[in-house]
Image (cartoon, coloured by chain):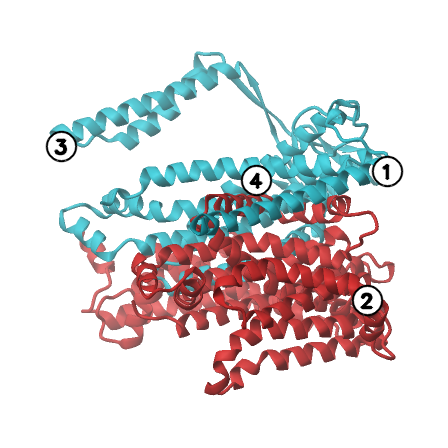
Amino acid sequence: MSKINFLKPDRSNLNTFLYIGSLLFFISVIDVFLNSFFKINLTGFLPSFISFLLPLILGFIGLYFIRIEFSGIKYLDLINKHINTNNFNAVLSLFIIFVIIKSTPPILSWFVIEASFAGDSKDVCTGSGACWTYIKVWMRRFMYGMYPNAEQWRINLSFVALALLGSVGYFATEKYKKYLTLYYVVIYPFIAFLFIFFFISGGPVFFDFSYGIIAAVISIILGFFIPSKFKFYYFIFVPITLYIALKYFIFYEELIELGKLEGLNWVETGAWGGLSLTFIISFFCLIFCFPIGMAFALGRRSDFPLIRYISIGFIEFWRGVPLITVLFMSAVMFPMFLPADFFIDKLVRCIIAISLFEAAYVAEVIRGGLQALPRGQYEAAKSLGMGYWRMHIFVILPQALKLVIPGIANTFLALVKDTPLIFVVGLLEIVGMLNLAKTNPKWLGFAMEGYVFAAIIFWIICYAMSKYSYNLEQKYKTER
Amino acid sequence: MNFKLKDIGPQLITVLAVVLVFGFFTYNAQVNMENRGIDFGYGFLSQESSFDVQFSLIEYDGSHSYFRAYLVGLLNTILVSVIGIVLATILGVIVGIARLSPNYLINKFAAFYVEFFRNIPLLLQIFFWYFAALRALPLPQDAEPMLGISYLTIKGLYVPAFIWQNFNIFFYSVVAAIIAIIVIRTYAKKVQENQGKQAPVLLISIGLILILPLLSFLIGGVKLSFEIPVLKQLATTSFIYEGGVSLPPELIALALSLSLYTATFIAECVRAGIQGVGKGQKEAAASIGLNPNQVLKLVVMPQALRIIIPPTTNQYLNLTKNSSLAAAIAYPDLVLVFAGTALMQTGKAIEIVSITMFTYLTLSISISILMNWYNKKIAIQEK
């Protein structure tokens, strides 16, 4: 018993235990460090099994010795509190420290020290490290896909312009703040569409749809002047009528001529690809899936049973099937459902499919927010004499959307992470381009570099998005 | 009149729009199929499929029907989903608890894991494991044995197969042990409620589940032997392993990436669940004299599970749906076998895609009905 007491560290002989303990701990760390960084095995004279486990044992004894409660030394107490609360935690902490030390040299040498950066052919990649030359040579393909090199400024210009236009919200003064929603929901997507249509595509790919968008914008602008009594019927009938009128009664040829800018070659959507395609698809799906999802969320909580059942059916259908089968459907089944002479570009089909798919998830998220609002909010709005639309637009939705910012951000993150699936219909964004480059006979054997590169890019995008959504959540948090 | 119109008008218009859209699609589909000379029907399911599948759980070759091919795909999907769900749950629970650890290093390590794997697209991870990581494995002839009996090679994982004699007796003994444990637990609970005595239920349970199957070996004539994979030379440079069970690298890559990816989400669910139990609950439980294990078992876990289970079931559903990404690395799951190969051969796009979607829909909806039922059962009964 006395022996155990002697080995039990306490405050009375603090210094002895502290020195012995920290010495043992440092020996163990230095042993592992030398072993992994300089390939020097201090304990080489021991049998290999013991030599392997020795640092762990020494470190464990060391941590046991310095585990003295209320020692009065600030840093010792901090260490004990955070990594050394009991035996189990001490072993785990040691294990993690050793794993970090052990894994640093190989990772570092693969990424930087042994890696090759220079040159522009496979011959320079002789070392055991990564071949970043491969990424350098294929950079344009990874970014722009098969888009012609000479025309790539069009993508850059469009993206820069759209980024600038998108940041308008930060610079808007108090006076114009109330128009921001209108700007972001209607005008900005329209401008973005025009940029993609005129600049990146440079041809009449989307033309049939541009009528639809023109019709929608005109009818929304006119809609502000329609008395609210007729608004519902107005929005049901007018856009469709406008669309048909635009399509069949306004001179087709003239508009096509108008749609072509002088001197820009048409680049078909099959040639688009790489990271820029990821951005284009995510951007449009994000814009489309939000209003569709909101409509179905409201539909699911509607008082009209038929509308409710249709919404439930829609949401549960899309949520129940994997995205890959939806894209299969858009690729092989959807053309069967359209008139024989009616052709929709496969990029557009893709965007429609992904938007509808994600809209179902957005709908469920928004429904959560609508359900979380107390009944009093609805009743208060109604008692002020507000109708259905007025109540939702001014009272319910602003609060509900604030509540579900994290959920919506998660859905958008999922959307960005789902874009690589478009390989199913033959469109190659960055992951697809990687798989193509990997099979190039001149550049065989660099799969790892490519995937690591893409992983880093996606990680940065997704991590930035999640941090941004966290900031938004903090900003719009209101006390209840 | 006006009142009625206001009620019926919007519904009528919505239904009309839906009917119009569907009618338009059906009409076009009919016209298109007539033009191309395709007839609609599910008769092809009983025809001979005449294609092979690399990996199947049931006996299958080209002479079997398309329906059999569908079953092969479905079983492969279920196999990878079940493996993925089990691994993801184990890993997710460990990481979720680790994120709540007071140990700074463990906490940050778990957080790093979650942030890292959650923010990389699943497809990219699958490609990474399949095309980059597993390609670095040794060839069959160079492989080092793991524990002397299994081999991890570039062609897959080879593990020993179990060969049973009188398996049914062993099975009955396990069932008997489980029933006995349930009876003893119920009895012990009753005794505790009436007399306040606690029986060592856990020890008895472990003993039962070990001893009864062991008895079946000793008395019941059950025999278990292993078939260990053996290296076999096909040609001068081509080797394979024979005997035992072989898991193809596609399955390994898929199961690994699915579980690593989904585990991050499950970890977050577990963390949220445990954090969602109020501190007062634990303190109250401790103050009435429960020991830490009892606090965890009787107070914290039942409440945490109520928060954890619905989102976790959702993640299981996601994993099952994500397993369809198998098509990208040619693991023969439902999408690849049925919506890929079978569709190419028969050209029956509408039938095959609809069957595939319907299958996934059935899986999802049945799981979500189950989940809703369970959710209702454990929900707190509030006034």
Give the Cα distance between marks 3 and 1.
78 Å
- Element type at mark 4: helix
| Image height of A454 relative to B306, above or below | below
Q: Amino acid at mark 4?
A: Ser
> To which chain does the residue with label 1 belong?
B
The chain in cyan: B
The answer to whether B115 appears left or right of B151 in the picture is left
> To which chain does the residue with label 4 belong?
B
Image quarter where the C terminus of chain B lies is top left
Tell which circle, 3 or 1, labels the residue nearer the N-terminal end: 1
Q: Which one is closest to the eye, mark 3 or mark 2? A: 2
- Element type at mark 3: loop
- Crowding near the residue tagged with mark 3, few <14, some 14–19, many ≥20 C-alpha atoms within 10 Å: few
Give how far across and how far down residue B176 sits, in percent: 38, 18
Give the Cα distance between marks 1 and 2.
28 Å
Tell which circle, 4 or 3, labels the residue nearer the N-terminal end: 4
The answer to whether A269 appears left or right of B121 in the picture is right
Q: Which one is closest to the eye, mark 1 or mark 4? A: 1
Question: Which residue position holds label 1?
Answer: B36
Toward the viewer: A294 or A81? A294
Q: Residue at x 54, y 52 (%)?
A: A360
Residue B48 visible, this orientation = yes
Q: Which mark is residue A204?
A: 2
Question: Which residue position holds label 4?
Answer: B81
